[in-house]
Image (cartoon, rainbow, N blue to C red):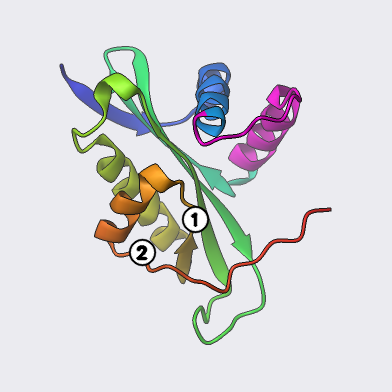
Amino acid sequence: MNITYRKLTENDLDEFIRMRIVQLREEGATEDIDLVPALKDYYHRHLSDGTFVSWLALDGEKIIGTSGMSFVEKPPYFGCPTGRIGLLSSMFTDPDYRRRGIAKELLDRVVSEARSYGCGTVQITASDMGMKLYSAYGFKSNGNFMQYKL
């Protein structure tokens, strides 16, 4: 096994989206809607304008791990004086390849992208499975996060 890493390209989107949907289902999503068109639209727009970046892990030509970082900006605040925030998503490793350091390597790469973009913080809504990885990496839980569904 020779794991390599490279950035996501438009040519990878079909497989990337398939893996994103598998990830969401694994995390418990049960809604019966077709997310593919919305995901394609999102990734096309944000890859082209530089506000989304992803690193992939590959075993040969097979994508075995994904990561994603969306860049957003809000008014600066004391915890993030730049106002630039990285929103981590799409962290997924094929079950046959887990517990080999692949997710940590992908996380290192997208966090580096966020740093280069000028982000002052990175945020994630973590699955139970991901909590151990993110905690070990240095992420801190913020009990203040709330969501209002429209």
What label sits on residue 139 in the rendered view?
2
The main secondary structure of the magenta stretch is helix
Gap between marks 1 and 2, in whole Å? 9 Å
For the question of whether residue 118 can be seen, the reply is: no
- Report helix, strand or loop for mark 1: loop
In percent of the image, x 28 and y 19: which residue is there?
Answer: 96
Estimate how packed mark 2 is, as few (under 14), some (14 to 19) or many (20 or more) residues with alpha carbons within 10 Å: some
Q: Does the magenta stretch include residue 82?
A: no
Q: Is residue 91 above or below residue 38?
A: below
Q: Tell me residue 72's x, y (percent).
A: 62, 60
Instruction: Give the mark nearer the N terminus: 1 vs 2.
Output: 1
Q: Mark 1 points at which residue?
A: 124
Q: Name which residue lies at 44% across and 58% down.
A: 114
Tell me residue 27's x, y (percent): 51, 36
3, 51: nearer the viewer? 3
The N terminus is located in which quarter?
Answer: top left
Q: Bin the neighbour count of mark 1 within 10 Å (Cα to Cα): few under 14, some 14-19, many 20 and up.
A: some
Q: Can residue 31 be seen in this view?
A: yes
Residue 73, position in %: x, y? Answer: 63, 66
Q: State which quadrant residue 71 falls in.
A: bottom right
Looking at numbered disc 1 in the image, what kind of residue is underneath it?
Answer: Ile
Q: Percent x, y for residue 57? A: 32, 28
Give above or below for 143 relative to 98.
below
Q: Cβ–Cβ below 8 Å for labels 1 and 2?
A: yes
The image quadrant that residue 29 belongs to is top right
The amino acid type of the residue labelled 2 equals: Phe
Query: Residue at horizontal 66%, vertical 30%?
Result: 30
Residue span colored magenta: 26-48
Front residue of this view, candidates 87 and 43: 87
In the figure, is residue 135 to the left or right of 147? left
